[in-house]
Image (cartoon, rainbow, N blue to C red):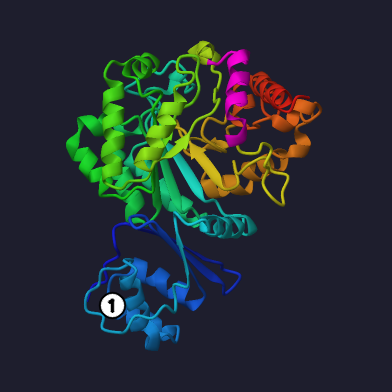
């Protein structure tokens, strides 16, 4: 008999060579549930997900002295939509999948914290970003991707090699981005390989190709991506299309968002505040709320002098106005990684690979750790990544946190690497922090 894993399942098991500890994190993407299992049962699950033969699973269960509970465990897996094997007759007991958390539960952060603490404790990478290409079918005015790599692409054989190695470093998620990643001829092949390995798949797309290619759309939703992030700059077509500089892009993007939600795909709608769409986020936010999508707004701008995109940035007056209007809804600033001086998870919980195979700590972060054509991820993690992480901490921000407004800074390392240099003050971030601080003083009558 063959054991069939449900296609909406992603799973990562961490088995530590120096310890007997084993922990599995199972994500039911379709039904929006997460599970955590530990110990021998975790090892058994890890074997099941990579061996479809029931006979092999029985033999391994016997090795672990778990043969007497195998049927009960598999019945519980089937009852929770994790496997689809039909001829299991054991009664279902809630015995093994004790930690079950709904995405919509207020306790979901517990699941995330549990994984993050585990990853941090054992120095494991959680996410690898594959910037498949910088070429794009839109011409967004605020784009910061370099134009000198428009002819570079990561194709399937390279992606496969990267994913295989990244698995050994602990990843549970592969994020495909660009440019517009769906125009890469190997996009679906790469995405399918990610899910074949039961890794989570997240995709950043503008939706144009998914609208144009019905076959690709149907293939895509059947992969059960864990998250699709799409930018929608306004509910008004003329404003959105003015930013993308492609007529009809708004209609395609909006149509794809609605269709993805109809197919219960998790969506995050991004609506960064630019000079061209200021104030439009309110209607976009309500739309996201109505269709059950996540929302990402706020003042976001990355300067690329070569792209001449500075005219897209909000004025100081509008930034301050935004903070006055939205002060109570903005998350706390300077929420650095707990129990560490690291500024964020760049280089530790994530790595990014550009179309020319340069490896960076995060998407858009202009700090090249090495190139995959000459150095493996494993080698870099031991050398240049280790060196980077030693530098990349709050104590080395010698020019920062000396003014009252600094506590209102949205410090993100990719900003200064684009407009001033690694670990340097960023004029754009400083302007933003001052505006937020001024809004705070006005609201508090200080």
The answer to whether 169 is drawn above or below residue 335 in the figure is below
Camera-side residue of 339 and 91: 91
Element type at marker 1? helix
Please state the horizontal and vertical placement of residue 328, each as a whole percent of the image. 61, 35
Query: Farthest residue in the left direction?
Result: 215
For image coordinates 65% across by 22% down, the residue present is 432
Quadrant where the C terminus sits is top right
Q: Classify 77 as above or below 261.
A: below
The residue pinned by badge 1 equals 54
Residue closest to the eye, 432 or 172: 432
Q: Is residue 444 visible?
A: yes
Decide: is 186 above or below 309: below
Horizontally, residue 289 falls left or right of residue 420, namely: left
Residue at (30, 29) in percent of width and height: 254
Q: Position of residue 431 (x, y in %)?
A: 67, 19
Using residue 186 as the reference point, say whether residue 433 is left or right of it.
right
Majority secondary structure in the magenta region: helix
Q: Where does the image place residue 366, in percent across and percent down from the top left? A: 58, 28
Determine if the magenta segment contains residue 343: no
Q: Quadrant of the N terminus?
A: bottom left
- Seen from the viewer's position, the closer of residues 367 and 331 is 331
Q: Residue at x 23, y 39 (%)?
A: 217
Q: Count the numbered circles shown.
A: 1
Q: Is residue 326 a member of the stretch shown in magenta?
A: yes
Q: Is residue 85 above or below residue 30?
A: below
Region of the chain picked out in magenta, as a range: 313-329
């Amino acid at each position: 008999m063959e054991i069939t894993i449900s296609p909406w399942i992603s799973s990562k098991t961490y088995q530590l060579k120096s310890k007997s500890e084993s922990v599995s994190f199972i994500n039911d993407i379709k039904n929006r549930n997460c599970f955590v299992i530990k110990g021998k049962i975790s090892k058994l699950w890890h074997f099941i997900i990579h061996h479809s033969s029931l006979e092999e699973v029985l033999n391994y269960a016997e090795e672990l002295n778990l043969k007497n509970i195998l049927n009960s465990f598999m019945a519980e897996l089937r009852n929770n939509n994790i496997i689809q094997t039909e001829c299991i007759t054991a009664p279902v007991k809630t015995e093994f999948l004790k930690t079950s958390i709904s995405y919509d539960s207020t306790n979901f952060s517990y699941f995330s914290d549990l994984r993050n603490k585990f990853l941090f404790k054992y120095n494991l990478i959680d996410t690898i970003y594959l910037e498949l290409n910088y070429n794009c079918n839109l011409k967004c005015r605020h784009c910061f991707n370099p134009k000198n790599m428009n002819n570079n692409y990561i194709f399937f054989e390279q992606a496969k090699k990267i994913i295989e190695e990244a698995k050994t470093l602990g990843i549970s998620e592969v994020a495909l981005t660009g440019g517009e990643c769906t125009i890469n001829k190997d996009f679906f092949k790469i995405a399918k390989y990610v899910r074949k390995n039961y890794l989570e798949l997240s995709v950043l797309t503008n939706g144009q190709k998914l609208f144009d290619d019905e076959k690709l759309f149907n293939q895509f939703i059947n992969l059960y991506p864990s998250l699709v992030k799409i930018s929608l700059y306004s509910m008004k077509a003329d404003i959105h299309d003015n930013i993308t500089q492609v007529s009809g892009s708004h209609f395609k993007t909006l149509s794809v968002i609605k269709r993805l939600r109809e197919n219960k795909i998790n969506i995050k709608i991004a609506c960064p505040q630019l000079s061209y769409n200021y104030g439009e986020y309110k209607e976009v936010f309500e739309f996201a709320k109505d269709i059950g999508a996540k929302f990402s707004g706020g003042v976001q701008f990355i300067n690329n002098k070569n792209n001449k995109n500075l005219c897209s940035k909000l004025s100081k007056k509008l930034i301050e106005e935004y903070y006055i209007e939205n002060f109570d809804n903005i998350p706390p600033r300077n929420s650095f990684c707990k129990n560490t001086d690291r500024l964020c998870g760049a280089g530790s919980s994530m790595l990014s690979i550009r179309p020319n195979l340069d490896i960076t700590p995060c998407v858009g972060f202009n700090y090249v750790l090495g190139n995959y054509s000459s150095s493996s991820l494993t080698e870099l993690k031991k050398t240049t990544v280790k060196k980077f992480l030693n530098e990349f901490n709050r104590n080395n921000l010698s020019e920062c946190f000396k003014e009252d407004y600094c506590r209102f800074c949205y410090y993100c390392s990719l900003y200064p690497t684009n407009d001033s240099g690694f670990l340097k003050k960023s004029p754009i971030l400083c302007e933003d922090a001052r505006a937020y601080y001024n809004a705070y003083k006005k609201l508090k009558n200080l």
